Amino acid sequence: MSEKKPYLVLARKYRPQTFDEVLGQPAVSVTLKNALSSKRLHHAYLFTGPRGVGKTTMARLLAKALNCEKGPTPEPCGQCVSCREIASACALDVLEMDAASHTGVDNVREIIIETVALAPSRDRYKVFIIDEAHMLSLAAFNALLKTLEEPPPHVVFVLATTEAAKVPATIASRCQRYKFKPIAAEVLEAHLKALAAKEKISVEPKALELLARNAEGSLRDAVGLLDQCRSFTDKAVTAELVREMFGLVREDLLLGLAQALLGRDAAGLAEHLRKVYEEGVEPAQLLKDLRSNLHRVYLGKVGLGERAGEAWAEALKGASAEALRFLLDRVNKTLEELRFGDSPRLSLELGLFGSVETAGDVSEWVSRLTELEKRLASGAPSPAARPQPVQVSEQKTTVDIVKNTENLSTIFNKAIGLFREDKPSLAAILETASPAQMPDGSWKIFCRRAFDLGQIQRNQEAIEAKLATLGWSSGKIVWEVGNPPSRAAGVAAPQDAGVEVPGPEEVPEPQAGVSVESSSLDRAGKILGGTVRFIKKKPS
């Protein structure tokens, strides 16, 4: 009575047996097939790429192609003794070494260096396959270096690694390097559908999409997930079953979270998070699922044609690309904080609620600032800040003018204080300038020197923008060189308005021992500007 064969997992049962069956790596397959056809074989190969994309499988196929009875051939028969033994990983002349568990120099010396000079026991080539090669120690790499550079003619090395950066340059430079790429989700989905049909597994299309997406480009992971679903139930594999098995978040909850985040709805976000907590979803898984869906919508917004799903495309059709980019950035940063924090729930809530409180769509702010710059350049006041027209009586008192002058002086002095922090040289020039209101209601600021006026004109936009932010909204300001007009012309004094200034006939000559700076003339000079000169009368 024959014994029943043990169950073979799908990943091993459907392992590719020819170069054409390797999924998603056409460049590597074609290059190796052409090298075998033309007999241009290298003695060392380095296969790099993410997990589960076919590196070890391709290494075994290369060993089969080299040692097949019909070989070296790009199409091994798969029926001869060598092909069958290599496929079952029991060939004497094909040695597979797991560098993760054989990291030391003694392991390399025992398995490779001491046996490399021996001729193959039966096959054409002796093939050494070193899996996870980056795990070898530096001493092991150094011991392997000379053998890898000049091996015997019957030896071929194949090094496979998921972290090419950790392989020393001295080793990589002695190998032909082949880069394996992650497999696209659409290719994985089609492959899973074909496997399900062969194994007579009933799977919903949405479930296949979820399995392919969560495999993250790994064929082995995708097939393993399908195998796990088949072990879970004898009935049809549904999308809801896949979410329940692997802790994925329901799509309606993800959509609700995305809409609350983009709509800056803190209450709605809190409600959806409460439902997520009730289902026991891990914060990291929640953020990964949210990021995956938002990423596809974002790629569609920027015109890359990525498939986003009808529900997501419809729900987020009003979101701009800038808002989605900002939200993706915040989700990524929150995932990084989860890795190092001791409270995943706190990190999750701080990240999500922080994105609600911060403005993510900067397009509105940019348009508003652009409009403000245009208004400042043209001299037109802001519509929101434009004063309402008022009825002004014919008798305009000096007190009103003095009040407006003090208002401008206060704003002007505040602006000077702000410029002291970032532009001290400009602040020093502004301190010598004096604002004044003209009889027609317009404003002028007088500079003492033409040089000062030139410096101010170079920074005029920044100065007027600063005045606008401090509350100035009464029209364009004219800058001139000279002294502000006196009160006699019916114009308010630029500084210290309301101070009584003696007339020219009341100004006494300076007494002996009293400096000009301490006299009332000094006060008048500060208010009116100009220079004080004493003219001595000639005796009549």
Image (cartoon, helix red, strand yellow):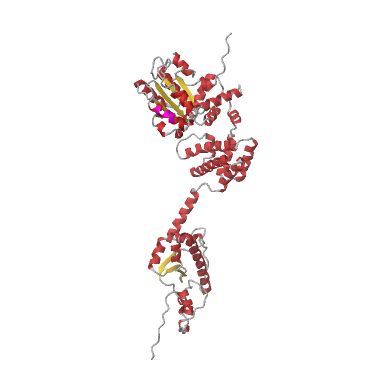
Whether residue 54 can be seen here: no
- Name the residue at the top extreme: 1
Residue 13's spot in the image, x, y percent? 52, 19
In this view, 19 is above or below 357: above
| Residue at image point 59% right, 30% down | 246
Quarter of the figure that contains the C terminus: bottom left
Q: In which quarter of the image is residue 478?
A: bottom left
Left or right: residue 153 versus residue 331 is left
Give coordinates of residue 306: x percent, y percent: 47, 35
In the picture, residue 429 is in which quadrant? Answer: bottom left
Q: Nearer the viewer, residue 115 or 389?
A: 115
308 horizontally vs 31: left or right: right
Q: Give the range drawn in magenta.
A: 142-146
Q: On the rendered image, what quadrant is the N terminus found in?
A: top right
Q: Could you tell me residue 483's position as x and y percent?
A: 42, 72
**What residue is drawn where x is 55% and y is 36%?**
288
